[in-house]
Amino acid sequence: MTLSIEVEADEARPGHGELSVIVFAPREPDPRTFEFRRTETVRDSARAAADSFGYEGGNPSFETERHVVLDRDKTLAEAGVHDGERLHLVDVGGGV
Amino acid sequence: MIPAVVTAAAVDAEFPAVMAWAARRPSWAVRYETTTLTLYADTIHPLTGQPITVAAELTGYRAVPPAWTITGPNGSFPTGGQIPGVSGSIFHPNRLICAPWSRLAYGEHGGPHSDWGGQSNWTSTGTGYTKADTLADMLSQIAMHLAVSPGMS
């Protein structure tokens, strides 16, 4: 079971096993706040965030503020995502 | 042909997101020249520190994708790097951005992809490849791949 809830930024109060993250999407000037289970995969949580921002298709993932692209197969906890972290939506489909 | 006023309106709608994206990245500065319908983004190569100008010539946008170019000192172009979990770089050895959202990647413009069904399919073709449907998303992709580029050549 996954938990992917977009919340008002000032209402973010994640419970045990959950975390709140601030997600920036290139196509929107302003970020949005989401709550995810720590056991949710990067793939599923990025997809949920991308859907919320209106992205269709593609290969969404998260990039950290230090420009590290997260492994989509890891859980948020395994990927080292912490409560309150700022993440950037990116597409990880390649080129060439 | 898409009238220039239509392209200008599309760019106007997307420009706040472009500016916001650049504002979150201190090493990037964007500007738009309305007379030439060209978006410019000035930055530096993150490894070498060389100045780079990324340009998107937007004639016909959004019916067709932008014609992206990247120019460094002496006409140099970023070399491709590897991002774990990403199949390949968008920086093609032929010195173009190889992506469905890059006009110059299509066979009709001399690019390597005659298999994508033509440039007018740019938002739906190339499943599994990089996907970016807005100018800010495209800049994001360029920045992500530039972050792992080993240099310019």
Image (cartoon, helix red, strand yellow):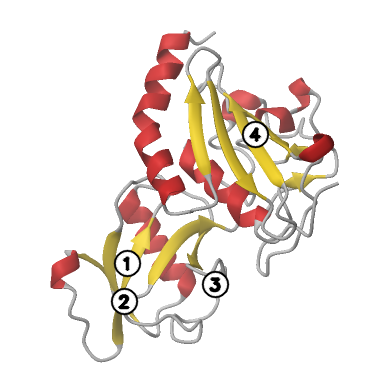
> Which residue: 51% across, 41% down?
B29
Q: Secondary structure at mark 3?
A: loop
Q: Chain of mark 1?
A: A
What is the number of the mark on residue A84? 2
Q: Is residue A60 above or below residue B102?
A: below
What is the number of the mark on residue B102? 4
Q: Nearer the viewer, residue B70 or B61?
A: B70
Q: CA distance from mark 3 to mark 2?
A: 16 Å
Q: Which residue is mark 1?
A: A22
Q: Mark 1–mark 4 contact, CB under 8 Å?
A: no
Q: Is residue B46 above or below residue A45?
A: above
Dot 2 alpha-carbon crowd within 10 angstroms: few under 14, some 14 to 19, many 20 or more: some
Quadrant location of the N terminus of chain B in the rendered image:
top right
Mark earlier in primary sequence (2, 1): 1
**Residue type of the residue flagged with mark 2:** Gly
Residue B139, located in which quarter of the rendered image? top right
| Residue A93 visible somewhere in the drawing | no
Q: CA distance from mark 2 to mark 1?
A: 7 Å
